[in-house]
Amino acid sequence: MDKLVVFATSFLDPLDTHPDGEGRGKAILDELEQSGVCTVEYRCTRDPRAALTPPDLDGVTAVIADLELYEESLLSKVGVGSGGSLKLIARYGVGTNSVDITGATKHGVLVANTPGANSVPTAEWSVATILDVAGRRIPHHRRSSHGLLKEGPSRLDISGRTLGVIGTGRVGRNVIRLMSGFQMKVIGCDIAPDPEWAESAGVTYVPLDELCRQADVITLHTSSTKEVISSRHLDLMKPTTALINCARGYQVDNKAAYAAVKDGRLFGYGLDEIWDYDQLPLDGLNITVSPHIGSDTDSGKAGMQTMSAEAVRDYLQGGRPEFVVNPEVLVG
């Protein structure tokens, strides 16, 4: 019998606000187990930062994956195409940077994800981070909580300024929609621009360098697996620009962004990732960080639970998951 392991840390979380789809993901897996399609093992308390080893995936056909790494060195030992048992990695989320897609394809492992499941929650968190950085929320909190008066520059005005959106997919478009009340001029940059949508949304596409020069607020929403904003791009930005990265940490040169804020060359930086730079203390700086929780709402969890479970169900029952990252595995 096939075996499924659920690594996603929030798959079994209680959903206090009872969103649409609550419990559907778990119900799908229960049905698979009860009908004899597979056994299900929940390892949701496992720290995704800990490296997986081949014994962790011994006899496992499919996983619902958190952010634990599936590197080629592991896939070469556990992938079904190389004598192992693993056939499917269903990512609990849209990002696939934790999976070596080339390695997965080489070793016969199909990869699926959940695009759209958490686009609104992630957009909401991005907007919240924009307002926190533009408002210097963290420096003001630190001082006022110690009985101290304001120190440093004033907040940034948002209304009527220029918003630069890098990546105009689901999340980026939701950010634009949520920010519309501020009546900002919106410019965008995307590797696959959609002129028809842009015209209807009042968005002007510009090259990345021009976006960095013009925008007062820059927010990243790309699916890139590489750095997007380098030190060179930071040098193009105004000292009154707020940079927001609620996509992936590696998409910005974080050390360069830190230096730019510290030196007064960038107004502030918002990052939805754990700050792993012990030698770069954040005290006193307009930099806000969070542990990659953009999708961490009840509706976001419900969507990811359902879509990842559906991918497993469809595959184990002989079908094709709706959202496949490396379809060449199916052809092979």
Image (tube, rainbow, N blue to C red):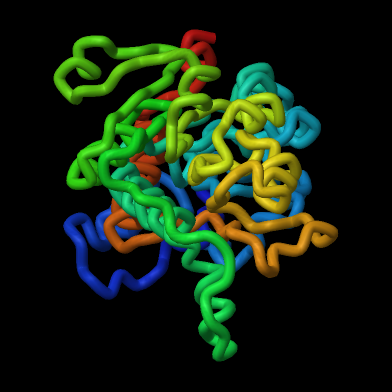
Task: State left or right for residue 226 relative to residue 185.
Answer: right
Count of all numbered marks drawn on residues in the image: 0
Residue placed furthest toward the right: 279
Q: Residue at x 40, y 49 (%)?
A: 126
Front residue of 297/288: it is: 288
Q: Position of residue 129 (x, y in %)?
A: 43, 55
Q: Position of residue 141 (x, y in %)?
A: 51, 76
- Split into 4 quadrants, where in the image is the C terminus? top right
Q: Position of residue 280 (x, y in %)?
A: 79, 57
Front residue of 251/269: it is: 269
Q: Residue at x 61, y 24 (%)?
A: 101
Q: Position of residue 265 (x, y in %)?
A: 65, 42
Task: State left or right for residue 305 relative to residue 174.
Answer: right
In this picture, is 198 found above or below 260? above
Front residue of 215/32: it is: 215
Q: Is residue 320 visible?
A: no
**Residue 199, quarter of the rendered image:** top left
Q: Is residue 179 visible?
A: yes
In this picture, is 123 found above or below 285? above
Q: Residue at x 73, y 24 (%)?
A: 82
In this picture, is 322 found above or below 306? above
Residue placed furthest toward the bottom: 147
Q: Residue at x 36, y 50 (%)?
A: 157
